[in-house]
Image (cartoon, rainbow, N blue to C red):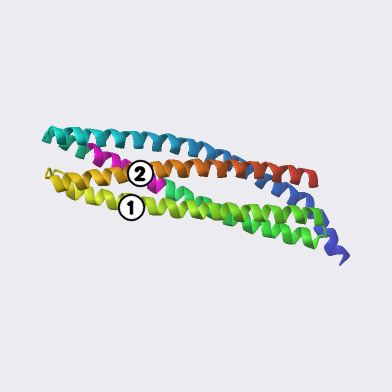
Amino acid sequence: MNRRIAVVLSLMPYLASAQMMRDRIEKAQDRGELRQDARERRDDWRDVKRLEALLAELDKARAANDTAALARVDAELKALLSSELAEGRAELAKDRAEVRRDNREIRSDRRELARDVAQGRPIAAADDRHDLRDDRRDRRDDIRDARAERASLARTRAIAMELDTLAGKTDAPSLDRKRALMAELVALGKAEQAGNRAERREDRRELREDRRELREDIRQR
C-alpha cells in the first residue's frame, strides 16, 4: 500500500505538467477559433452584400426586360452559391471537430477528477468539477452550432439545386420564384452572421475558462 502511494506521489509532478501543457494547447486552439470566427464573419458579410446587390440587379434587369443582364445574374449567382457551399462544408467540418475536441476534454476532466478524489485533494477536485461543468456546457453549445450549420448547409444546397432549374428562364413565375429564393439566401446569410457573433462570444468565454484552468493548475503544483 505504501509503495502504491509512493508511486502515485512520484507521478504527480508529471501529471501536473501534462495538465498544464493541455491547458496551454487549449488556449492556443481558442485563439485560433477566434481568428477563424473573424474570417467567417467577414466572409458572411461580404456574401450577404453581394447577394443583396444581385437581388437589386435582378429587379433592374427584369424591369428593363434585359435578358443578357438576367443571364449575368444567373451566372454570378451560380458562382456565389458554389463558393457558399464550399464555405459551409468547411464550417461544418470545423464545428464537428470542435465537438470531438470537447469530448476529449470531458474525458480528460473526468480522469483528473477521479485522480484528485483518489488522492484526497478536495480543492483540486472542486476545480475539476467546475472545469467539467464548463466543458459540458461548451459541448452543448458546439453541438447546437454544428446542427444549425448542417441545417443551413442543407437548405442552401436545396436552394442551389432549385435555382439551377430556373436558370435561363425569364417568365414571370420563374423570376418570382428566383427572387424569393434569393431573398431567402439573404435571410440565411444574416442568420449566419448572428450565429457567428454568438459563436465568437462562446469562444471568448472558452478562452477565459482555459486561462483560469491554467492559473489553477499552476497554483496547485
Q: Decide if residue 64 is on the left or right side of residue 212.
A: left
Q: Nearer the viewer, residue 152 or 88?
A: 152
Residue found 34% across the figure and 54% down from its top = 154
Q: Which of the numbered marks, if any, corresponds to residue 155?
A: 1
Q: Find disc 2 in the rendering and name its residue.
A: 187
Q: Can residue 30 be seen in this view?
A: yes
Residue furthest toward the right?
2
Residue furthest toward the bottom?
1
Q: Check disc 2: other Cα within 10 Å, few if <14, some if 14-19, many if 20+.
A: few
> Which amino acid type is shown beneath numbered disc 1?
Arg
Q: Does residue 58 lie above or below 101 as drawn?
A: above
Q: Which of the numbered marks, if any, corresponds to residue 56?
A: none
Expressed as whole percent of the image width and height from the top left, the position of residue 21 reads 67, 45
Q: Decide if residue 28 is on the left or right side of residue 57.
A: right
> Which amino acid type is shown beneath numbered disc 2?
Ala
Expressed as whole percent of the image width and height from the top left, the position of residue 178 reads 21, 45
Expressed as whole percent of the image width and height from the top left, the position of residue 77 reads 25, 40
Mark 2 or 1, nearer chain start: 1
Residues drawn in magenta: 76-90
Q: Quadrant of the N terminus?
A: bottom right
Q: Which of 143 and 29 is in front in this view?
A: 143
Q: Is mark 1 on a helix, strand or loop?
A: helix
Q: Is mark 2 on a helix, strand or loop?
A: helix
Expressed as whole percent of the image width and height from the top left, the position of residue 92 reads 43, 50
Q: Decide if residue 158 is on the left or right side of residue 145.
A: left
CA separation, marks 2 and 1?
12 Å
